[in-house]
Image: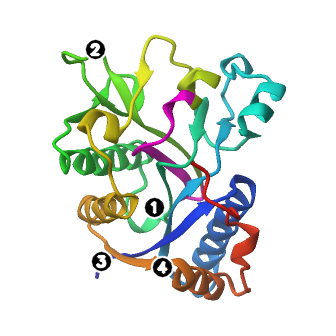
Amino acid sequence: MKQLVKACRLGRLRYAPTWELQREIQNRLIEAKRAEPRRDLPHVMLLLEHEPVFTLGKSGDDQNVVWDSERRAREGVAFHRIDRGGDVTFHGPGQLVGYPILDLDRFFTDIHRYLRELEEAVIRVLARVDLEGGRVEGRTGVWIGPDSTGPERKLCALGVRCSRWVTMHGFALNVQPRLSFYEGIVPCGIVDRGVTSMALEAGRSLEMSRVMDWFETAFAEGFDCLVESLTGEAAWDWLSQFLGRPLDPEVYLLPDPVD
């Protein structure tokens, strides 16, 4: 029987409480797998957008955060030091952020393969708009180019954390964010390459829900699993049941769209 992954489309969320939500879901899966008898709960994938925020991973260099606290405040950008791998990255409106929280014991216990499968799912998404995504040796993520436009440009960043083979964090795919926010960091600590977006490369606007559809399909194919999608109130209700406590979406949701 194929593994079941519940994909919860949650809207535009504040970063800090969403980070705590990830950890709570991860702990729930760890507790279930360690129980006697073992309980195989559904895996969870959170699909969302964030407020403008810079996050710095455990191995990150503070010097790669270019904007100081005053500039970040003027630009409306939050900042968090977090527990994933990697350096500094940006999240914000127009970017698809995915947090697959999977028990890899039920898939495969190989974190490098896990990262490659996430990259492959994103590459398949890019193909939907006739973009040829690829990898750059020694650099995690998904890139486009080199081509007539220039050298490689990064479209998708990855950074994960794994505890007892249960994952958290994930990927950030630039669908159509405001790319000027990247002026505030050295993305992933890479100084010799830039960033881009699906919309910029495809030359047209893209609907976020359609990109989510494409990603869920590609993820299900790559991980050979069943993905069930939940949106809005249904997603929050299911997560409340999964965690055994009521969740108040207002704790997480941004009060107004940020464009």
Instruction: Let me know if residue 76 is in the magenta part.
Output: no
| Mark toward the start of the polypeptide (4 vs 2) | 4
Q: Nearer the viewer, residue 207 or 215?
A: 207
The mark lying in front, picked from 2 and 3, is 2
Q: Secondary structure at mark 4?
A: loop
Rounded to the nearest angstrom, the CA distance separating label 3 from label 4 is: 11 Å
Q: Position of residue 105 (x, y in %)?
A: 46, 64
Which label is found at residue 2? 3
Q: Position of residue 22 (x, y in %)?
A: 64, 62
The answer to whether mark 4 and mark 2 are in CB contact below 8 A is no
Instruction: Let me know if residue 171 is in the magenta part.
Output: yes
In the picture provided, is 234 more to the left or to the right than 199? right
The mark lying in front, picked from 4 and 2, is 2
Which label is found at residue 42? 4
Picture quarter with the N terminus: bottom left
Circle 4: residue type: Pro
Read off the residue under disc 1.
104
Rounded to the nearest angstrom, the CA distance separating label 4 from label 1 is: 12 Å
In the picture provided, is 121 more to the left or to the right than 166? left
Circle 3: residue type: Lys
Above-or-below relation of 12 to 232: above
The answer to whether mark 4 and mark 1 are in CB contact below 8 A is no
| Mark toward the start of the polypeptide (3 vs 1) | 3
Which label is found at residue 83? none
Please, which colouring scheme is shown? rainbow
Q: Nearer the viewer, residue 73 or 59?
A: 73
Q: Which residues are magenta?
A: 163-180
Q: Residue furthest top?
A: 192
Circle 4 packing at 10 Å, graded few (<14), some (14-19), many (20+), is: some
The mark lying in front, picked from 2 and 1, is 2
| Mark toward the start of the polypeptide (4 vs 1) | 4
Q: Secondary structure at mark 3?
A: loop
